[in-house]
Image (tube, rainbow, N blue to C red):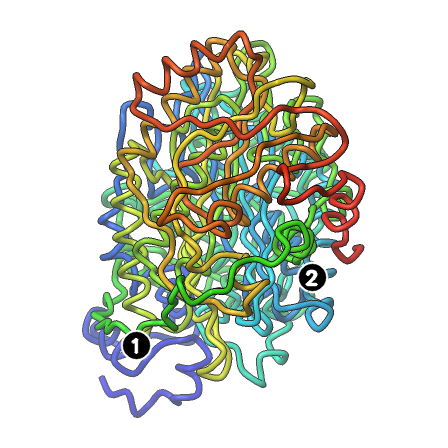
Amino acid sequence: MSIKSVDERRLREVALTPDEYRAILEQLKRAPNEVELGMLGVLWSEHCSYKSSKALLRRLPSSGPGVVQGPGENAGAVEIGDGWAAVFKVESHNHPSAIEPYQGAATGVGGIIRDVIAMGARPIALLNSLRFGPMPASSRHFEGVVAGIGGYGNCIGIPTVGGEVYFEECYANNPLVNAMCVGLVRTDQLMRARAEGTGNSLVLVGADTGRDGIHGASFASLELDERSSERRPAVQVGNPFLEKCLLEACMDLSHTDAVIAIQDLGAAGLTSAVAECAGRVDGAGARIDVARVPRRERGMTPYDVMLSESQERMLVVVQRGREREVESIFEAWDLTSAAIGEVTGDGLLTVFDGRDEVARLPVKLLTDGAPMRRLVGFAPEPPYGLDVDALPPPADPGASLLRLLASPNLTSRRGLFRRYDHMVGDSTVIAPGGDAAMLRVKGTRLGLAMTTDCNARYCHLDPHLGAQLAVAEAARNIVATGARPLAVTDCLNFANPDRPEVYWELEEAVAGLAHACRLLDLPVVSGNVSLYNDSNGESAIYPTPVIGMVGVIDDYEKRLGAGLRVEGDFVLMIGSTHNDLGGSEYLKVEHGHVAGRPPALDLTREKAVHRLILAAAQSGYLHSAHDCAEGGMLVGLAECCLLGGIGVRCPAVRPEPPLRLDAAFFAESPSRFIVSAASRAMPEMQSLARRHNVELSLLGLAGGDSIEFEGQLKVSLAELRAAWESMVAV
């Protein structure tokens, strides 16, 4: 049992370390053959085993009264009412998108859709969270990713209703492409991917298997370097039209009880799909014959078939004797299907190629055998400090506002959203461009709100606080629509955890995420970890824990938009403002710094503000609501005016010390909303504010064609729009 017989280059190819290979020898009591080594390599990769992060993820709250399915399945699910559950998950496709932007993004969308389909749910919406380097140098990544997302989502007929895009130097070589999918299913029809019932058939359906994507999971578990372009074959190729047929066929399967489970073939392909299905059932195993797998290329070996990550494929567990019934459904959608094996009770995954046995491995060795890595984190030197008092006062707040609106991180995303079909399906009632999107649940009054959020600058400056702020902002975006936040899915994007400062960032971010979710009663029901997002040991990304969130409103007719709606309305600030300029867009744009401490967050106050907004929305007091976030009050107010086409007239801002004037305009203090209400609703709003112990202040009156603060600034909506819509066309 010596490692000397294995070429270390071969181990690197399958992303195994010498110590991990020794662990395989000890557990198997023999040396694995080539096929077995490849299978173990992909399932023991960071991408599949979470060997560096699993211990940390156990800290996250994952249960609650509405949770139907927590982590451990293809996606999470929560009850939303009227017998419906929302199924959702966010995942990364960062490394493939760095090498092949269009296909990397497109297949990321396809993969997350199949995760939702595998739960028996119909996908109804897509969202994304994207990070790129500065333009125009990063235009290849940016344009390719946007085209891939639009191309796949538009063709399959699922609306892309929301997302976020940021540009920072640290993402120049390591773009982040996170895709989220939301689906609906009746709670009594939710499926789990469990290979139950010895003798039941394993049926592979969808695209023929090719060599694309081999070692894709291993590739996603390594740093990018100058040789990464050689791994282009590890990037999958998508076919959204085939996936549409696969989607509809899987929906038709709900009409028969012949199907036990459905599992997506994603990372690690057939190896992962079969092993994970069996691994969820004590003592279960599987026997498959790769000779039965439909192929699109000649000369494919068992190794190729087991590790291929060809897209648009699903594994279906079918009751023995009812295979023909299921195959007829696939035939109706012109899909290729083949019974490739059966469930066993021996706890082994046995692979044949015709009569020849080519692999025999314990399922638990594949799914749970990877040695967990015990990494040590050390806090790095604190980022550049900030002396707020040393900042010069803004010479011209109106000019600063225009520069902020024109900054790449704050400009209108209309140029992107117009590439995505966000109305297909006829359910979108709040379109992208505001705080959160919302879709109606057909046949009910329910509205399902959804968003993705993360300010990675905050996480760079303080990962613990930054992660909390990401959760809080996502919740505010849901609340701004009038919906109650329900649950979270996360995508933890970090650099190389072997570096102590990066592992410390991961530890701190997970701790912050857990703390915020507990205090805001938000279970984390699904998610993904993406590590090694750096290049050549340098150029590490900011820690970027993306938060996906869903919420529900009992009557979507009571939903709120972000734009001002009625001239003469009172425009109010809910919440208080402090000198929170650390990590702000104002500080970066006007002073060239990413520095200081992120805004302080009081989660008890955050929760109180949410309750006030929801009570006011339910009672019909509000005409609009908008989260006050990046860019501060003045940028938030400008967005309200631009989205509604109505200006606002305000008295001069006279902040009481120690609050500074630039902070009053541009600080990014959390737990704040800009809302509008009719004058007759003011007594009720003031009463609600007192009851919830939340600050309420008058900003001004809606009306006119400009933003005006008496004696301080006056900028026309036309000037604001010209700056806001200056984002480079795509």
Q: Using the image as rendered, state which of residue 191 and residue 307 is in the foreground.
A: 191
Secondary structure of the residue carrying tag 2 is helix
Location of residue 559 in the rendering, given as x and y in whole percent from the top left corner: 56, 18
> Disc 2 designates what residue?
142
Q: Which amino acid does the dot numbered 1 rest on?
A: Glu
Q: Using the image as rendered, state which of residue 619 and residue 509 is in the foreground.
A: 619
Name the residue at 33% across, 90% down.
Answer: 5
- State the quadrant of the C terminus: bottom right
Q: Using the image as rendered, state which of residue 452 and residue 333 is in the foreground.
A: 452
- Choose the circle earlier in sequence order: 1 or 2: 2
Location of residue 583 in the rendering, given as x and y in whole percent from the top left corner: 45, 60
Q: Residue furthest bottom?
A: 4
Location of residue 111 in the rendering, given as x and y in whole percent from the top left corner: 56, 48
Label at residue 381: 1
Name the residue at 40% across, 38% down.
Answer: 193
Say if 19 sits above or below 639 in the image. below
Label at residue 18: none
Secondary structure of the residue carrying tag 1 is loop
Say if 482 sits above or below 358 in the image. above
Q: In this view, does 297 lie to the left or right of 251?
A: right
Name the residue at 73% across, 35% down.
Answer: 706
- State the quadrant of the N terminus: bottom left
Q: Using the image as rendered, state which of residue 172 and residue 206 is in the foreground.
A: 172
Q: To which quarter of the image does residue 476 belong?
A: top left
Q: Which amino acid does the dot numbered 2 rest on?
A: Phe
Q: To which quarter of the image does residue 20 belong?
A: bottom left
